[in-house]
Image (cartoon, rainbow, N blue to C red):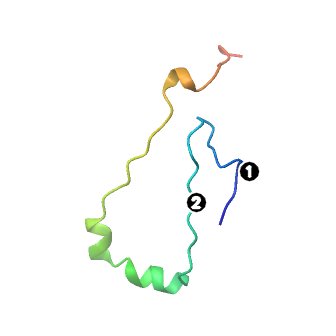
Amino acid sequence: MHSGNDDDTDAAGGAAVSHSVNQPPEDVLAYWTPERMAEAVPRDIRLPAAEDSGPRSEGK
């Protein structure tokens, strides 16, 4: 599954990542038991630095 930029780069110029999911939704729901959800660790998210985000309008 792919969406977004055709050149496979993100807004910051890094490589875009996509994943295909071939599991039925029922299998995914069965996997994520309350115990697994309680032990899950959030994924690290890298945001662009403030100076890399482009120009901003001042209160306009």
**In this rendering, position of residue 46 left or right of residue 3:** left
**In this rendering, position of residue 25 left or right of residue 45:** right
Residues at marks 2 and 1, CA–CA distance in whole angstroms: 12 Å
Residue 33 location (% of width, % of height):
34, 79
- Is 35 located above or below residue 47 in the figure? below
Q: Residue at x 48, y 27 (%)?
A: 49
Q: Which residue lies under the disc numbered 1?
A: 6
**Given the image, on which type of amino acid does mark 2 rest?**
Ser
Residue 56 location (% of width, % of height):
64, 19
Disc with the residue nearer the chain's start (2 vs 1): 1
Q: Which residue lies under the disc numbered 2?
A: 18
Q: Identify the secondary structure beneath mark 2.
A: loop
**Given the image, on which type of amino acid does mark 1 rest?**
Asp
> Number of numbered discs present?
2
The quadrant in which residue 37 appears is bottom left
- Is 43 located above or below residue 60 in the figure? below
Dot 2: within a 10 Å radius of its alpha carbon, few (fewer than 14), some, or many (20 or more) residues?
few
Q: Residue at x 56, y 40 (%)?
A: 14
